[in-house]
Image (tube, grey):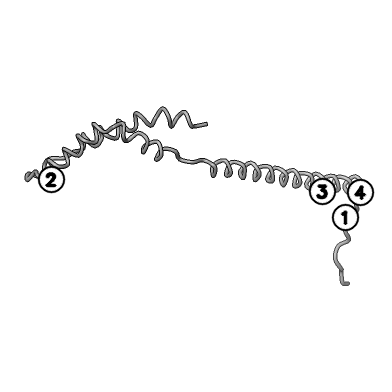
Amino acid sequence: LSRGPPPPPPTRPETDRSLGRFRADVAQMTDEDEREEEVEEEVEEEEEEEEEEAVDTRPELEEYCKPKCVKAWVAYQECVDRVEKDTTGEAHCTGQYFDYWACVDKCVAPKLFDSLK
């Protein structure tokens, strides 16, 4: 008495239709997911292009503004000369250095922010 594999369950037409609808729904969802991924990739590419186009104008503006801060630069250079002659090792020019760059930044900031989108 050898038994073979059990017979397949009886199929019902409504089960076959449900399975067909399920497969169609899965295929549609896959297509929609692929379309969404394509759109996301396009948006990312556009954003990357926009980012690549950005140019830092700050160095050019700093060069433009440095001559307007000559007084602060001279004060810094005078301090550097004094510090080089100092034997105690406690003298520094941090204040004059920051004064100079504060002057440059004050000149650069309005022009820099005007050029931003």
Is label 2 in contact with label 1 (beta carbons under 8 Å)? no
Residue occupying the far left of the picture: 87
Mark 3, other Cα within 10 Å: few <14 / some 14–19 / many ≥20: few
Q: Confirm or deny contact between disc 3 and disc 1 (CB under 8 A).
A: no
Q: Name the spot of residue 75 as percent of width and height, x first.
A: 19, 34
- Residue type marked 3: Arg
Residue 9 is tagged as: 1
Q: CA distance from mark 2 to mark 1?
A: 97 Å
Whole-angstrom CA distance, mark 2 to mark 4, is 98 Å
CA–CA distance in space, label 4 to label 1: 9 Å
Residue position marked by numbered label 3 in the rendering? 23
* Mark in front: 3 vs 1: 3
- Note whether 116 is above or below 8 in the view shown: above
Tell me the mark number nearer the camera, choosing from 3 and 2.
2
Query: On the image, numbered disc 2 is attached to which residue?
Result: 84
* Circle 1: residue type: Pro
Residue drawn at x 74%, y 43% as measured from the top left: 32
- What residue type is disc 4 on? Arg
Q: Earlier in the sequence, mark 2 or mark 4?
A: 4
Q: Can you tell which mark lies on residue 12?
A: 4
Q: Nearer the viewer, mark 4 or mark 3?
A: 3
Q: Position of residue 25 (x, y in %)?
A: 80, 44
Mark 4 → mark 3, Cα distance in angstroms: 17 Å
Residue 63 sits in which quadrant? top left
